[in-house]
Image (cartoon, helix red, strand yellow):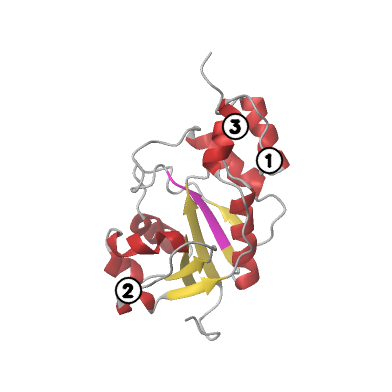
Amino acid sequence: MRTADLPRPWQVIYGGSFDPFHAGHRAVVDALLAWGADTVWVVPAARSPFKSEAPGAPDQDRLRMCHLGTRGMNGVQVSAVDLARPAPSYAVDTIRELQEAHSGGSWWWAIGDEHLPTLADWRAMDWVAGRVRFAVVGRPGHPTAGEMPKALSDYLDPVSMSPVAVSATSIRAALTAGDDPEGLPEPVRRWIMERGLYRSPA
């Protein structure tokens, strides 16, 4: 568990596909800020190493949607650091580059608790665990740390968040079908419509 005497600023890296950035993502950012983060780094991935398919929207559109979806939120920075490297995007590279560019303070990597079972499989996890703690966003119905090795569970800090019933998969499916889905921040929705993202090929 984190302690209040960890050096400031408290910086949290929140990576993901953000394909598109939706109300659930914004709720995670809100929860991290309420939890105590001084800065939340929203970092769209070129492609997660745990996903075989590339994101549905182009990189620059996903980056723009992250900016639009976090507009007006104090303490939020959107970074294209992962998009500047070839896919897939590994946390070890993201952490190294952000910490070299913004040294000092204490660092966390934000993950949903549904990802805890694969945490030990991350590339260079020994190095990663030596550079960040993990801000674990709790979501009802998902597994907990369970039998995770003690060496990793010592670096987990829980972050409470009210459930948000929205998913990027359902949003993309609705858009492909020509529907106007709920769960999108209005600036993101407008960008998607103007750009014609996620539509079925003519």
The residue lying at 56 percent from left, 26 percent from top is: 176
Q: Which residues are magenta?
A: 40-45
Q: Are circles 1 and 3 on residues that touch, CB within 8 Å? A: no
According to the picture, the residue beneath numbered tag 2 turns out to be 147
According to the picture, the residue beneath numbered tag 3 turns out to be 174
Magenta highlight: main SS: strand
Which class describes the residues within 10 Å of circle 3: few (<14), some (14-19), or many (20+)? Answer: some
Q: Quadrant of residue 195?
A: top right
Alpha-carbon span between mark 3 and mark 2:
38 Å
Q: Is 16 left, or right, of 167 in this rendering? A: left
Q: Is residue 181 above or below residue 42?
A: above
Q: Secondary structure at mark 2?
A: loop
x%, y% of residue 35? Answer: 61, 72
Alpha-carbon span between mark 2 and mark 1:
37 Å
The residue lying at 33 percent from left, 39 percent from top is: 52
Q: Secondary structure at mark 1?
A: loop
**Does residue 178 show up?**
yes
Which label's residue is closer to the chain start, 1 or 3? 3
Q: Is 105 left, or right, of 53 in this rendering? A: right
Q: Secondary structure at mark 3?
A: helix
Q: Amino acid at mark 3?
A: Ala
x%, y% of residue 18? Answer: 53, 45
According to the picture, the residue beneath numbered tag 1 turns out to be 182
**Does residue 105 show up?**
no
